[in-house]
Amino acid sequence: MIDELRIYTLRPGGMARYLDLAETVAVPVRGDRHGQLLGFWANEVGAANAVVNLWRHKSLESRQAVRGTLEALPAWREKYLAGVRPLMLRQVVRFLDPVQPLSVPATPGPHVYEQRLFQVRPGEGGRLAEALARQAEPGQIAVWTTFAGPINEVVQLLAHADPAARLARSLHGQDGPLARHAELIQELETSLMLPAPHSPLG
């Protein structure tokens, strides 16, 4: 099993149109036949003109096979790709190994989600991921290491009841990751995200 994290940077003003195409065209065309959709979000804080989607595949080989069949579908090419290409500035794909496999939030939604991308020293991703999984923060629902795309990264996903719940805990505080794991971390990029209407995680 591998998880695939896709981050699309959109042209300012393109978010509403992109989310509409994703909900009405992309997700119905894909279903679960071309990878299992785990989550779909729009950034609100951080890289605010970005969308994040998370997919699960049985293997890299199965991922490549389903991408090939997907790209052969006229509805995918002519309705979805033709509509979203003018909206996109860039795409970044990360392939992830789960250290703490994704789970649903323990509290009922709606939630504000937080994605943290830790850049670590070469060879230290496993150490940081295991430490984050072992000393789980409130709201933490997944931790991965990257093995393709940007490497030497750890990806952490959290679900918060609201922005105030997140901001009550500082990244730099005594229990924050930048204090507890400073010797392993080179950089940290964090974003607050809202789930799209079609996201399995609401």
Image: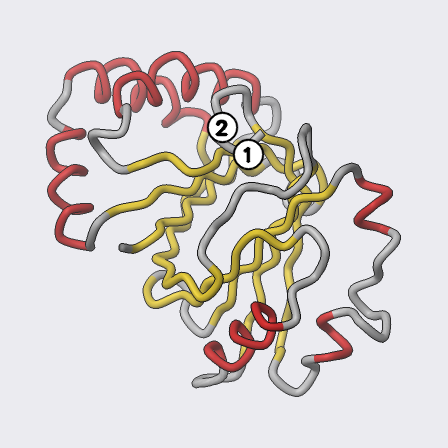
CA gap, disc 2 to disc 1? Answer: 7 Å
Q: Please state the total of marks drawn on the protein image.
A: 2
The disc labelled 1 sits on which kind of residue? Trp
Residue 46 is situated, as x and y percent measured from the top left of the image, at 69, 47
Secondary structure found at label 1: strand
| Image mark for residue 41 | 1
Look at 12% across and 37% down and name the residue there.
Answer: 68
Identify the residue shown where x is 64% and y is 59%: 189
Task: Check disc 2 and report its element: helix, strand or loop.
Answer: loop
Q: Are marks 2 and 1 in contact (CB under 8 Å)?
A: yes
Crowding around mark 1 (Cα neighbors within 10 Å: few <14, some 14 to 19, many 20+) is: many
- Amino acid found under the numbered disc labelled 2: Ser
Asked if residue 187 is positioned above or below residue 159 in the image, the reply reads below
Q: Which mark is residue 199?
A: 2
Is 164 placed left or right of 1 in the picture?
right
Q: Nearer the viewer, mark 2 or mark 1?
A: 2
